[in-house]
Image (cartoon, rainbow, N blue to C red):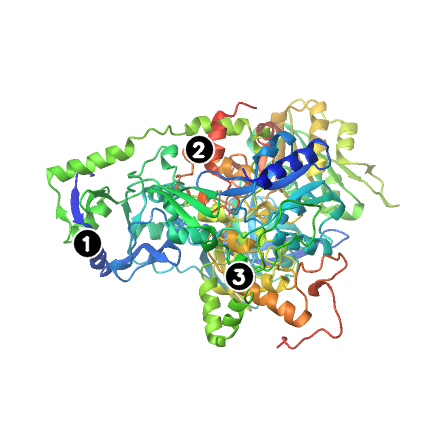
Amino acid sequence: MSNEIRIISREDLPKWLDQMLGTFTVVAPTRQDDYTNFGVITSGNQADFDAVNTRMSPKQIFFPKTERLFGFATDRQQVKLDDTPQQITPQVLFGVRPCDARSIAMLDKVFDTDVYRDQQYVSRRKATTIVSLACKQLAPSCFCTRLGSNPADMAGSDLLIIELPEDRFAIGTLTPKGADLLTAADLPAQATAQDAQAFDKAVRIAQDTTVKPIDSDKLAAKLARIFDSAFWDRWHDRCLGCGTCTYLCPTCHCFDIADEAKNNTGQRVRNWDSCMFDLFTLHASGHNPRPSQRQHLRQRVMHKFSYTVDRYGQAFCVGCGRCVNRCPVNIDIREILDELEDYQGG
Amino acid sequence: MSSIEQELRKIAADLLSTKKVDLVIGYESGSAGIGVRPAFIRSASDADRLVYNPLCGHNLSVFLNRHKGQKVAIVLKPCDTRSIVGLIQERQIDRDLLTILAVPCEGVVDISRIEKIVPPDTIRSLAIENDELVVQTDQGPKRLPLKDLLSPGCAICKITEPVISDQVLGQSQRKPAEGDEFAEVQAFSAKSPQQRWDDFCSEMSKCITCFACRNACPACYCTTCFIDASGPKWLGKTDHLSDVQVFHITRMIHMAGRCTGCGACLRACPVGVNLHKYTGKIRSDAREFFDFEAGDDPDAKAKPPLSTYSGSDPNDFFM
Amino acid sequence: MADPYLPYTVTIRKITIENAAKDIKTFELVFADPAQRQQFDFMPGQFAQLSVFGAGESPIGIASSPLDANHISFTVKKYPTGVVTTALHNCQPHQTIGLRGPFGNHYPLLDMLGKDIVIVGGGFAVTTLRATIRYLLHESKRSDFGKITFFYGARTPGELVYREEISTWAARSDIEVHLTVDHPDESWTQHTGVVPAVVTKIAPASSNSIALVCGPPIMVKYSIPALKDLGFAPERIITSLEMRMKCGIGKCGRCNIGSKYVCIDGPVFSVAELERLPQEF
């Protein structure tokens, strides 16, 4: 479907968003103090099209930090449960970077399967049209190309916008949902054959990379082999054990389930959790199978680059660079990947 | 390489090769775009990884409780030595096993200030040249005067000398900062209760409860933090503002007489929550009510207000 | 597809204090809607999430047999820092609690058909083994299996759970019961010493035999070599693991050992399988 191309000028982008606001809730990168984050906009002018990456990933739009699973009310011996789903309205997630869109396609593999369908997640996904914005250039912390992706990757997007010269943007249609959004708009002009070529060229340029991607199958097998090796001795010393890497990560999806109650009523909620925390694996008996930072960090790397390859056929890292940028002690996953590839020990 | 770095590497190599210590905790260069990071040096041959410059913000004393029972040498800036004093007074550190390498400090760089000037998406590397920070960007280098980039605590810092040390490297050129250390606190206190509350709510709404502030804080040494305790469970870990606020309020109250204002929490926060004015309030209260400033008195027997009780303790701040 | 997080509501029919320290109780539960008992289709070795609304959920092995038609039971040890186990222990009969599951795999009952069964249990972790024995001894099942030898131990006689039921088993001729304690009292007449030593002493035959082991980590650790010495192949020694678990459906991410989730790929593993996994449990 990428042959359906429309063209829009930079100054018309906010107008297009304004049009959508009549029908959809629009979530887009907005400036918040020192950085951008995804937020609900009330005017197209609030969207920031230039920041490479938002501070928080868009995962919280589908998998919020706290999610109500159901409510309960206890009255003497009786219990009433209420799992009325939350009202979900149609929304457009606009200006997502291709790495983040790709991460959403990965989360789908976790939360939307034949044997398990996470109701809230799937409802939100169904109600959301994802419009991605290809990156003009990689930020210094970006490493999507190492993960076999590129700044115009189409995975997870319904529409992909690529900037062309002279402040024009080409909009490529990737799914019927994307086509519907585009049809409803009356701004974007039909592309000429020349524009279509320009779009294809821009995609090709983005894909043309000199970076050698990791071989995720090979890496997964190697990780399984070196689980007990000295490789893991040298990364965790400085790890503070905070949740920054996992909470900022667009693909990390571990969670806790807890009850929040006051007197006789309350709700069971699902909260984000992190393999970096001691509490994550602590048994009620006091036993902890992963008690140290060394094991926490190994778990994180193994989960991203080995266990998910086994279970979902894909490494769960999109190279967005958030963990690289914000780790308070500069634990850089790119260094770990580089050294893993070279590591010969057993 | 600065003379301090040279000296540091030599001392570290000597301490390790003579087995006076098992571990040297210092700073090394970070990966591309990130200035420096904590370094853990265990052999003399690795000592030349050590660096020291105004990007060395981390308060390394936070790492000491993971190395209990080991002979450790640690690189500390003058204000960081105040954290050590607190840890000794609260019996968290065996002073005999510790070698403090005190380095001079002219103030450290606040990365978030750089990011206000240069978009973080474009920073390729950071380097210090004399009194300038050279930021390599996609558009070429940008030179920024260091004095404009100092961390909030450094701009008002009156600590020029280590309060405790075993070896003092170099000599501090800096004079204690003039002006009121608690000006920000006073400005905040002068606001109406509603304004303060609104300010607090707005600041707390940024927090993602990743606990980087707690985990980067040398004074937060509890084996089980109250928020992780389950017998009883004190509070939830939802994203509701009340959970976030109660966590921070409780942590800050625990910081009374412990917080030295080192800024580790600010530096670690991935979403720019400004805890400084609240911890500043706690520090100014500890000073006002208990005449106690964490880290001031190197006497191991001095007791922080939360570790002691006196009948004459002021209690008017209780509602 | 049903909401996997929404529990059944079940009523506590009976609470039995199982040990001298009174920190182990068995809860007999009945479904608020009896038809749900049919939906709750499980096999011995599986677990479920019990919840006290307001306190939360905790994964507990099912202690009753699927052939116990009317009820389902769980034996729960109370831990000082266990929010849910403490709340459960504070429950009274007729109270309504939540039940989610069944989860995980079960003991390999198909592989066990026609074989002699050696069952090795310790402390209160004997719960799912009790479910298994109740199943094996059921009149409709007993002839499908060979000889059954049951080893069970605890620190003191007072810490052996299901005492009454076990004494009815001991009186039967179709199961051999060996009880042992580390610290006997004056009235103790059976074995003394740790479980693996008793297994070695009694030396059950390993040919055409399968062993199920569940107990405290230290007991499991020493029982495995004891069984191997008797000729049990690692494929024929089956054990069940405990992990901190939240979702029970392989999503929440904490109960993994390598790429296996204990909540869906376990909790029952053969020693051969465990030997292939990272030693992180």
Along the polypeptide, which appears first: circle 1 or circle 2? 1
> Is A123 in front, or is A74?
A123
- Mark 3 secondary-structure assignment: helix
Task: Give how far across and how far down residue C214 sits, in percent.
Answer: 66, 38
Task: Give how far across and how far down residue A252 sits, in percent.
Answer: 45, 44
Q: Which residue is denoted by mark 3 in the rendering?
A: B276
The C terminus of chain A: image quadrant: top right
- Mark 2 secondary-structure assignment: helix
Q: Residues within 10 Å of mark 2 (few under 14, many from 20)?
A: many
Q: Is residue B78 visible?
A: yes
The residue shown at (57%, 33%) is A232
Q: Please say if C18 is above or below A338.
A: below
Front disc: 3 or 1: 3
Task: Give how far across and how far down residue C259 sits, in percent.
Answer: 51, 34
Q: Please say if A311 is above or below B148.
A: above
Q: Residues within 10 Å of mark 3 (few under 14, many from 20)?
A: some
> Is A329 in front, or is C264?
A329
Q: Evaluate whether label 1 is on the same chain as label 2.
A: yes
Task: Give how far across and how far down residue B117 sits, in percent.
Answer: 38, 52
> Is C159 in front, or is C242?
C242
- Mark 1 secondary-structure assignment: helix
Q: Which residue is denoted by mark 2 in the rendering?
A: A309
> Is B35 in front, or is A189?
B35
Labels 3 & 2 near each other (Cβ < 8 A): no
Q: Which residue is denoted by mark 1 in the rendering?
A: A11
On what subunit does the disc labeled 2 rest? Answer: A
